[in-house]
Image: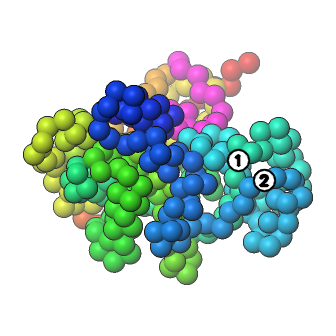
Amino acid sequence: MISLFEDDVRAAATLREQLGVEGLTVEQSIYFRDKNAMNVRAAELGLRTAIWTLPHTKNHVRQFAAEHQYPIVIKPYDGVSCTNTYKVTSDEELDRTWPLLQAQRHDYRVEAFIHGKQFHVDTMVRDGEVLFESVGEYTAQILENWQDAPMGSVTHPATGVHREMLDAARTVVTSFGLRTGIAHTEFYLDDEGTLTFGETAARMAGAWVPSMYRHAYGIDLAYDSVRAEVEPGYTPAGDISGCTGASYLWSSATGRIDRITDADSLSALPYVCHVEVNKAPGDVLPPVVGTRGQDLGHVVVAGKSPAEVSENLRDIHTRFSVLTTNVP
């Protein structure tokens, strides 16, 4: 029973228990899905977590914001990605946001916003032993950036604070009960250098991340994690010695596409490992409404250091362009 999406984690655990299949139990799955239980358990393990509360009333949320300062984040306790997640920056914005959740308020949680950098750690384990792990820094905090610029991430060597993230993710994943499988964990590094646990999920990463590992490292998260689970002794054979990065291709343009940079011209660049352009002239672009932007495609690049990879991604986004005509 292997979960590819967060909504499937608890259902898969229920089936395992009913069929007598080894793996994550229902009790353990709660720590990967219920962000309230998740944060309490992470704190018990010694990790720093965001300050949080439950939105019992609008006034309670307002008092929380007064104590911990805006912005605050209001999100589902068992949410997926950034769906129905709100970054609230003022009392006035809280007044506008509250009607969107007041009837389902007990499905939500409220967190103090963490200023700083956001990271993801991807961990593949079998019988508690790490088979693959990597840490990547998002090109910007998702809630600050997803409507204004392309989202992506850049990997870092396993040294210093990035080694701390890998070790913390290993502690979380195995202590929550995942002995064999794959997990995607997020951390924040604030402006003072303090590391804070964000959340974790008992499933492989999504978005551009699988393509990044596959084309730069030779690691196929889906194939390798499944094979490692069913074949004792199997170890992924990828090479993770270099630095890589990937991001969505992005445009703020809307309307019918007249011209768009093609994949061949980007693939010709020496640092590009892989590129996909999903749109073509004649397609119509809607406004940006989620972290995938307008699903224009994505690019994977390599470099000698995280700084060089970041520069290569910036170069890609300078070269990539979309020209559109408004549609009545």
Seen from the viewer's position, the closer of residues 129 and 327 is: 129
Labels 1 & 2 near each other (Cβ < 8 A): yes
Q: Position of residue 148 (x, y in %)?
A: 62, 49
Left or right: 96, with 53 as reference point: right
Instruction: Give me the residue at 78% from left, 60% from top.
Output: 89
Q: Position of residue 57 (x, y in %)?
A: 86, 53
Q: Position of residue 154 (x, y in %)?
A: 38, 58
The kind of residue tagged 1 is Tyr
State whether residue 225 is above or below residue 305.
above
Q: Is residue 245 magenta?
A: no
Any mark on residue 108, and which?
1
Which secondary structure lies at badge 1?
strand
The quarter in which the C terminus is drawn is top right
Q: Which residues are magenta?
A: 282-297
State whether residue 39 is above or below residue 147.
below
Instruction: Give me the residue at 29% from left, 74% from top.
Output: 159
Q: Residues within 10 Å of mark 1 (few under 14, many from 20)?
A: many
Q: Is residue 111 visible?
A: yes
Q: Position of residue 140 (x, y in %)?
A: 53, 58
Instruction: Identify residue for label 2.
Output: 55
